[in-house]
Amino acid sequence: MQKAVYKRVIIKLSGEALAGTNGNGINEQVLDDITNQIKAVRDLGVEIGIIVGGGNFWRGRQGKEMDRTTADHMGMLATVINALALQDALERKGVPTRVQTALTITRVAEPYILRKALSHLNKGRVVIFACGTGNPYFTTDTAAALRAAEINAEVLLLAKNVDGIYDSDPKVNKNAKKLDVVTYKEYINKELHAMDTTAITICMENDIHVLAFGLFEDNALMRAVTGETIGTLIK
């Protein structure tokens, strides 16, 4: 039987990942595949927190003529849609799950309370953190780093649509080279873009490793938590 090398993790899922090739909305087959992976990892005894984005519905920067704070709050609400979809899919698989939101929406989810989140994790429940940090001008990457620090996660699993971090954009440069390991400072100095600089700085200051990998590789999450070499490690 495989054994996890981490006890507690944060998984960062982009909204686009839930959309699959559609680009928008939620692809139910993709949702099923992702939650199957999460269930398998949870069944190893790993305590799981999830930060989910909302880009498959709305990103704050899309509101070019809109007030930035309003646009960002719309993006936070989009993350709630994805969080509820993940919760529903996981619970249909028998995985106890709680959604906590940084904006108060008590009819559909709990407000984010750290002690309550820790209690859920200790009881083996998956906790999905929605609405980012609850503040405009901050990304869900930053929220992932912040929550990872708060719950004392051992690693931030950055599930991407590409198989790791490259020295340049592989979609633009066919000679782009994949990086296996990079330090926090190298990441910042090279101006890499898998996560924003604020998020990386939080991880660096709190000694939280980041593992960026392709979510749709075979058994990607399982390979990540069992210590197999996969993706790019930022440490």
Image (spheres, rainbow, N blue to C red):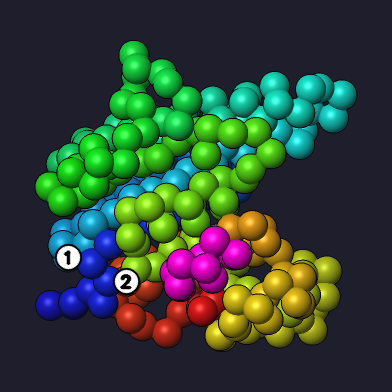
Mark 1 or mark 2, earlier in chain: 1
Determine which residue is flagged by label 2: 225
In the rendering, at what x and y percent does residue 137 appear?
Answer: 69, 39
Quadrant of the frame with the N terminus:
bottom left
In terms of image quadrants, where is residue 234?
A: bottom right
Q: Residue at x 41, y 30 (%)?
A: 101
In the rendering, at what x and y percent does residue 182 appear?
Answer: 60, 83
Kind of residue at disc 2: Val
Q: Residue at x 17, y 65 (%)?
A: 44
Would residue 183 be found to the left or right of residue 119 on screen? right
Q: Residues within 10 Å of mark 1 (few under 14, many from 20)?
A: some
Start-end of magenta stretch: 200-209
Determine which residue is flagged by label 1: 44
In the rendering, at what x and y percent does residue 67 appear?
Answer: 79, 22
Q: Is residue 89 visible?
A: no
Q: Residue at x 82, y 75 (%)?
A: 173
